[in-house]
Image (tube, helix red, strand yellow):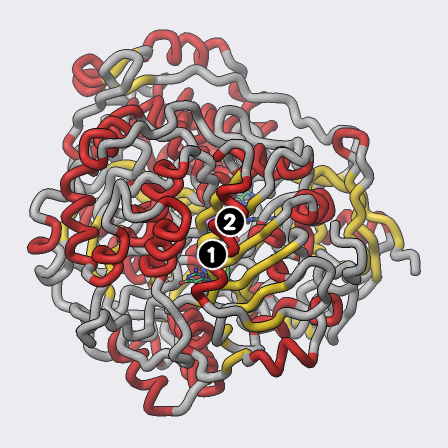
Amino acid sequence: MAPHRKRANPEPPEELLDLKRSAPDDSAAGATGVAVAVQHVFSEMPVARGVKSLFSLNQHGGVDCPGCAWPDPDDERSRLGEYCENGAKAIAEEATSKRLTPAFFAEHDVASLAELNDYEIGKKGRIAQPMVLEKGANHYTPISWEQAFERIAGHLKACASPHEALFYTSGRTSNEAAFLYQLFVRAFGTNNLPDCSNMCHESSGVALGESLGIGKGSVKLEDFYEAEAIVILGQNPGTNHPRMLSALQKAKENGAVILSVNPLIEAGLVAFKNPQQVRGAIGLKARLTDLYLQVRINGDLPLLQALSKLLLEAGAIDPDFIASKTHGFDAWKAHLEAASLDDLIADSGVPREDVMAAFELLRGRKRIIACWAMGLTQQRNAVATIQEVVNLLLAKGSIGKPGAGTCPVRGHSNVQGDRTMGIFEKPPAALLDALEREFKFSPPREHGLDVVDGIRAMHDGRIRVFFAMGGNFLSATPDTHYTAEALERCALTVHVSTKLNRSHLVTGEEAMILPCLARTDEDLNSAGERQFVTTENSMGVVQASKGNLRPVSDELLSEPAIVCRLAEATLGAAPVPWTELADDYDQIRNLIERTIPGFENYNARVRERGGFYLPNSARIGDFPTASTGKANFTVSVAEPLDLEGHDFIMMTLRSHDQFNTTIYGLDDRYRGVRNERRVVFLNEDECAERGWKEGDLVDLINRSGGRERVARLFIVVPYNIPRGCAATYFPEANVLVPIDRVARKSNTPTSKFVPMNVVPHRH
Ligand SMILES: Nc1nc2c(c(=O)[nH]1)N[C@H]1C(S)=C(S)[C@@H](COP(=O)(O)OP(=O)(O)OC[C@H]3O[C@@H](n4cnc5c(=O)[nH]c(N)nc54)[C@H](O)[C@@H]3O)O[C@H]1N2
Ligand SMILES: Nc1nc2c(c(=O)[nH]1)N[C@H]1C(S)=C(S)[C@@H](COP(=O)(O)OP(=O)(O)OC[C@H]3O[C@@H](n4cnc5c(=O)[nH]c(N)nc54)[C@H](O)[C@@H]3O)O[C@H]1N2
Ligand code: SF4
Ligand SMILES: [Mo]
């Protein structure tokens, strides 16, 4: 750590606002959603800019929403709003006309900026020019792009080995930028390419790869309209994928039944007032969930096994599909036959009558879609649970035909595309072979570091340079204080960013912020032509995104330009003509076409309305698994609940007013929590038994792996949540998420299963 710098607090400040409570909502969206959306946009920018940004959102030829990865309809799109409340908030956040000038950084030192909460930090505006934090300095000062690239290149070249650098990616980065970035990093000589997926759907990728031979989901949006049943596990679409509710509504109108599996009764899953329909806007609700299974945290695996056991016993399976397409059925069947139904039901936490009702709903239905998100992926046995979802679908013959299949609902708008482009610390040999063929260099073959192992490596002093393409590494990762120490041991930390965040404040010896264009910004090449980038959504559709707003500063560079200039400064013009590429994204797409499968005729096809679908083997009933060449049933043993001596299991969630670590506002409207984020939801009866009342101030403590972690100053909110379970918001509670509790095989932090105790707050 630099000798003289004042240390910035890595955690959001311990401060309370003024909690207002109301009963949780029983439906999502509706007119309030629209009003809130518009209010967010117009509080950040002039009306004309706001209108321009909203009208191009998710339109053909317009901007792909920088919010979540939910797909747009393939067919005609409504001129008046193919977006949701949270899409509008994402736009408000990035298209804001407020900007952070050098004067701002001269006025505030890094330690005092860290005393602001994340909401306040985000509201400061867009970063307007490259900034450097010199060794020992307390203030960021301006630096020219030229000098910035020279300085970073100097640090990279000073590494004793390329493996002393770590290159993180968040999931908003376009295909073009991601492709160039991984190419640069591999030409530099390492596969140290951790990404936000490591904390997100990594467990899905591993599970689906082993079971079905492809790490992505198999369904298209249209499949929702043909499904007979949709099971939604560990996902809160009303907040995190709001336009999924329109798809669910349509599915329901076409006769699908919907089962929700969640420890919380989430408003968006219960019912929906579609703001794009007159009925919804005037408040008429469409009921969505037919059966709500309120599992205990991580009770999903035993629940799925109980349901499969019942389906097997009833013969409600598809023997032809099982015989022709799968492997391992007999072992799986034997395993479930030997298991005790009573134990499985008890372990799931779901009342027996609800399990039986779910069985009855699934029994006669053959076209089933299973959707899931972080409630399943961020568990120690996440891979096993997701494979149990697949087992059930396989037994029902419910993959590889219309109206059926797997739907891991992805988070960031291009997180899936970034992986397709090769942002992966464990690259497949075929990708490296293709790079070697095309670019005539030998890419490193040894696996690189993922997020958790990268943090450990920094902590051990094995990493000199940390470079982040987007994201907020400090606040998004587990064990905030441990991660802060890790970052502080680097010689240089660099962030390519749009907005200020806490990762810019807790840094290596030297630090830089490189401000980039965002999705909505106009991206002009040297001839003054507007360039577009491309992204891949959660269902494998690749489409164009063309920004149309004037950037807040002339000093912003696009992400592809930043990669090209850094690459040139570090490696020179070989093996890739970097400068030419930054000026013509069609050329980048030509290189992608030549090295990544599925992108034939990329430039032409992505210019067609709605883009194109990437090939998907599982969608067409082909399961090229490495082990057997068939779809694999897998046997998993439900594990005993391991609280490591603590009283509660805590899940860390998103409120309705945030995008990951970006805090749009202070309300979680659907859960009836307003103007506060430092809350802990606890079971109502347990609160009564322990004498805890709403508003009591508590500290939360975790002692996993012999290290004490304390999250101080939280407010008790008695809530409808299973006994022994608790919930807090991410990132305030990340200080408690132990770095050493990770999912097996995927190494994902178990952010939905944090053992903890609640004690009265100590001043
Ligand atoms: N507006 C908005 N949109 C977003 C994001 C955002 O922050 N804001 N983030 C984006 C990203 S990167 C992602 S990954 C997705 C995240 O989307 P989600 O996965 O929906 O996000 P979480 O808030 O983490 O919610 C997880 C849900 O899982 C439930 N859950 C927790 N533990 C369990 C369990 O053990 N079993 C079951 N069955 N359920 C459980 C919780 O009650 C909650 O409803 O959203 C994306 N979209
Ligand atoms: N406890 C807990 N921790 C979690 C989770 C959880 O559920 N619980 N969820 C995990 C999940 S699913 C994820 S995906 C990660 C998210 O981890 P990250 O992706 O690292 O975090 P974000 O908060 O999405 O990053 C926000 C920052 O990205 C920058 N940014 C925004 N748009 C752009 C852009 O267009 N270009 C560039 N270069 N920068 C941009 C802005 O500076 C902004 O401050 O967090 C994980 N952490
Ligand atoms: S559902 Fe997701 S991608 Fe669609 S408009 Fe809303 S935030 Fe944007
Ligand atoms: Mo995510």
Label 1: few (<14), some (14–19) or many (≥20) C-alpha neighbours in 10 Å = some
659 lies left or right of 416: right
- Image coords of residue 423 (percent x, y): 37, 41
Placement of 145 over or under 413, stated as above or below: below
Give left or right: position of 518 versus 658: left
Three-letter code for the amino acid on which mark 1 is drawn: Glu
The reply to whether discs 1 and 2 touch (Cβ–Cβ < 8 Å) is yes
Residue that badge 2 annotates: 154
Q: Position of residue 705 (x, y in %)?
A: 76, 29
Task: Report if residue 485 is visible in the image.
Answer: yes
Res. 270 visible in picture? no
Q: Nearer the viewer, residue 359 or 506?
A: 506
Give coordinates of residue 269: x percent, y percent: 43, 56
Q: Which mark is residue 150?
A: 1
Q: Decide which of 416, 383 is in the foreground and name it.
A: 416
Q: Is residue 16 left or right of residue 242?
A: right
Which residue is nearer to you in this view: 383 or 369?
383
Callout 1: CB less than 8 Å from ligand 2: no
Q: Residue at x 44, y 36 (%)?
A: 202
Q: Nearer the viewer, residue 219 or 193?
A: 193
Task: From this view, report whether residue 727 is shown above or below residue 531.
Answer: above
Q: Amino acid at mark 2?
A: Gly
Task: Report, in whole angstroms, how far the alpha carbon at label 1 lies from the one at label 2.
Answer: 6 Å
User: 363 above or below 467?
Assistant: above
